[in-house]
Image (tube, rainbow, N blue to C red):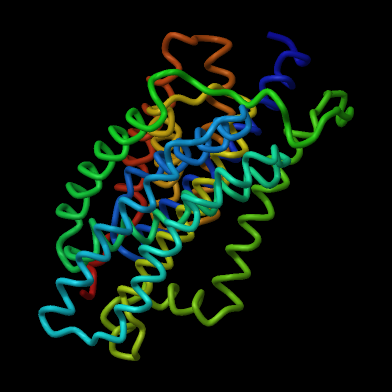
Amino acid sequence: MDWSIAKILMQDGLVTGVIYALMAVSLVLVFVVTRIIFIAQGEFVTFGALTFAIMADGGKPGTIWLLPMFGAVLFLKELYFVYKGKDRKTLLKSLGVFIIYPLFLLWAVPVVLATDPSLWVKAFLTLLLVVPLGPMLYRIAYEPVAEHSVLTLLIVSIAVHYALVGLGLVFFGAEGWLVSEPFFDGSVDIASLTWSYQSLFVIGMTVAIIAALWLFFGKTLYGRALRATAVNRRGARLVGIGTSMSGHLTFFLTALVGVLSGIMIVSFITITYETGFMIGLKGFVGAIIGGLVSYPLAAFGAIGIGLIEAFTTFWASDYKEVIVFGIVIPVLLLRALLVKHEEDEE
């Protein structure tokens, strides 16, 4: 180990660390608003990465069938509620969101792909296909048990994780995918290191996403509503903020961040149907460092995880995962000693 090798490892660790930071911020967002420990966050990375990789390779992703499947389930659920006495006016909106939009994409995506569009268009199609699964997933799996205990929500998250992993195997197969064509070609020398434009793009996009989330929570009405729900769910309901709306919006945001992360990282590492779980777990370690409440601590902790992973890969690659996940133990011990426990008002 010398300084030149250390700089290269720091470069690699920073690129992967910013992806873990996005995972950590997403996990904190979901937990503080909905009390859900969202284990399946990594599956959005997988679905986004593999959907994009298949389209980049000239194929048609199987995920074009996911939205119609989820939409059909939700529309049948909506029909049942209307039968039980719910206002029929919501049925037309549900028809458009759950049936017409998925079927339109089912027709439109192959038509657009037949023209061999650019990577940017394929990335946009990936967002259209995968991001809506977030709020749909919340409505199917979490909304019926939204007021249950954190333990119940954790059990549901485990079930959702395994269901999505199984769907990933069905739609993508067991082989790995890597996008060899980057969004940006070329490189530049910074601090005596050669940085590819793709690496700088990933880092810049991460900074932009975190800045956009900060502006969203600080400057918009919906962002303030989510902050209010995170501070006090009961108080938010009393002033007219629907926790259901908060859940849908939160899962939309976390799906968006996950899919963008997948699109960016599949240019650096080979992604399989189960890779996202490990990426999500490393983001979860960062979220634990932030106490599942602090966005900045979670982000910096996750970047630290990326750097530690890079160096342990060089020094002790066989024990890389043990060292990374073992960091949780001293962090939890430290928090137990230093953080004063307060009972939840709710």
| Quadrant of the rendering where the C terminus is positioned | bottom left
Front-most of 277 and 55?
Answer: 55
Kindly tell me whether residue 25 is visible in this rendering. Answer: no
Location of residue 28 (image quadrant): bottom left
Indicate the position of residue 106 as horizontal and vertical percent values: 46, 50
Q: In the displayed structure, does residue 311 sit left or right of residue 82?
A: right
Q: Residue at x 63, y 46 (%)?
A: 112
**The quarter of the displayed image where residue 147 is located:** bottom left
How far from the left and from the top, in percent, is residue 32?
A: 37, 63
Work out whether 227 lies above or below 185.
Answer: below
Residue at the image point whose x is 15% and y is 60% from the top: 149
Q: What is the quadrant of the N terminus in the image? A: top right
Image coordinates for residue 323, horizontal then vertical, percent: 42, 21
Determine whether, in the image, residue 233 is placed left or right of residue 224: left
Q: Which of 73 and 321 is in front in this view?
A: 73
Identified at 44% across, 45% down, the residue is 64
Report the residue that reaches farthest toward the bottom: 239
Q: Position of residue 75 (x, y in %)?
A: 27, 65
Is residue 17 at least partly visible in the picture? Answer: yes
- When the figure is inspected, residue 55 is found, relative to residue 89, above or below; the finding is above
Along the viewing direction, whichever of 105 and 182 lies nearer the viewer:
105
Q: Residue furthest left?
A: 84
Residue 11 found in image quarter: top right
Decide if residue 11 is on the left or right side of residue 281: right
Q: Viewer-proximal residue, 30 or 56?
A: 56
> What residue lies at 54% left-to-right and 14% top-to-bottom?
313
Q: How many marks?
A: 0
